[in-house]
Image (tube, rainbow, N blue to C red):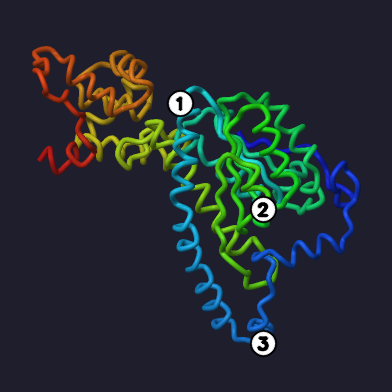
Amino acid sequence: MTSISPHRNGGPVPGPGGAPRPYGELRAQLDTLATEAFRPELADIDRLPTLDIARLMNGEDRTVPDAIAAQLPRIAAAIDATAERMARGGRLIYAGAGTAGRMGVLDASECPPTFNTAPTQVVGLIAGGPGAMVNAAEGAEDSERLATVDLDALELTADDTVVGISASGRTPYAIGAVAHARSLGALTVGLSGNAGSPLAAAADHGIEVVTGPELITGSTRLKAGTAQKLVLNMISTITMIRLGKTYGNLMVDLRASNEKLRARSRRIVALATGADDTEIEAALAAADGEVKNAILIVLASVDGPGAARLLDENGGRLRAALDTAARTAPGAAAPGPGEDRAVARTPADTGRGARE
């Protein structure tokens, strides 16, 4: 679900207790942030030919994966903890403002068609109201209280995961979301673009992807935003892999809501099974269009209800369902002492080449 904070652009920047902070203090804080640093060597960038500027930007973007690589152990730990809670029925909730909030809403909105998640399973919160997705509402980021209100509206539980996202690592809305979620026992992740950030310190799992000064001073929609997009891709995608939403590298849980996706569904069944078009169409018809069920129908030689039952018994995990079908098939030999149980075939094993 894409959930957007209803609050509007705020007023003066609040400090502790809601009192406005002196702007000199905030300016001093910005001066310490790598994402806000001025690069004098680029002071004449507006005089360069367009191709040279494009080359500069491309070179900057190439540094992002390396910055993420330094944080991979932290990212993996956060994903494992998230998947554990989601397996118990918890939700993945992103909270941020500005570009960071938009990255969270984007990632959340892409999960239902890709992984067939329920609309409420992956949620994106952005400060500033519905218009904040297309029009800046930067003042909304300055209130921790607004984040508390937004999370309370979701009736947060201890099985939920809240990911606060902020390039600076000091955005009150993101910090407020993480602090409130943690106080309620939820898992918290703080994704920041600066080292030693208050956001990372407030979270159970702090991830600080330091991409450095931007090409345009302080424009964190550039490298910092790219890093956020890539990390959120990792969090949602690998979590869904851990939850059995894929079979190998196939999107077997996708929601076929248009012609392109219906064609993709048929291709996925073909790649997983090696079946011909007639068999695929029959299997999808028996499975009411569900890709996982259709694959089971072909590979396990079961009918539609049998495929649904196998998936239900195995928590929706196709590989486990195939393993169960192999063990329980008529004439299947029980494993002897010290023998491993049958392991389901992989998409590579069951692809068209293996059938021909």
- Of the numbered discs 3 and 1, the one sitting upstream in the chain is 3
Give the image location of residue 167, x and y in percent.
Answer: 65, 56
Please tell me whether residue 337 is drawn above or below residue 238 in the rendered image. above
Nearest the camera: 92 or 21? 21
Q: Nearer the viewer, mark 2 or mark 3?
A: 2
Lateral position of residue 349 relative to residue 186, left or right: left
**Quarter-of-image position of residue 2:** top right
Bin the neighbour count of mark 2 within 10 Å (Cα to Cα): few under 14, some 14-19, many 20 and up. Answer: many
Q: Which mark is residue 47?
A: 3
Q: Give the residue type at disc 2.
A: Gly
Q: Nearer the viewer, mark 3 or mark 1?
A: 1
- For the image shown, how many numbered marks are present on the structure? 3
Q: Secondary structure at mark 2?
A: loop
Give the image location of residue 304, x and y in percent.
Answer: 30, 17
Bin the neighbour count of mark 1 within 10 Å (Cα to Cα): few under 14, some 14-19, many 20 and up. Answer: some
Q: Nearer the viewer, mark 1 or mark 2?
A: 2
The residue sitting at 31% across, 38% down in the picture is 268
Q: Secondary structure at mark 1?
A: loop
Q: Which mark is residue 218?
A: none
Q: Are marks 3 and 1 in contact (CB under 8 Å)?
A: no
Q: Give the residue type at disc 1.
A: Ala
The residue sitting at 55% across, 78% down in the picture is 56
Lateral position of residue 259 relative to residue 134, left or right: left
Bin the neighbour count of mark 3 within 10 Å (Cα to Cα): few under 14, some 14-19, many 20 and up. Answer: few
Nearest the camera: 69 or 52? 69
- Of the numbered discs 1 and 2, the one sitting upstream in the chain is 1
Mark 1 lies on residue: 87
Q: Give the residue type at disc 3.
A: Arg
Mark 2 lies on residue: 169
The quarter in which the C terminus is drawn is top left
The residue sitting at 53% across, 27% down in the picture is 118
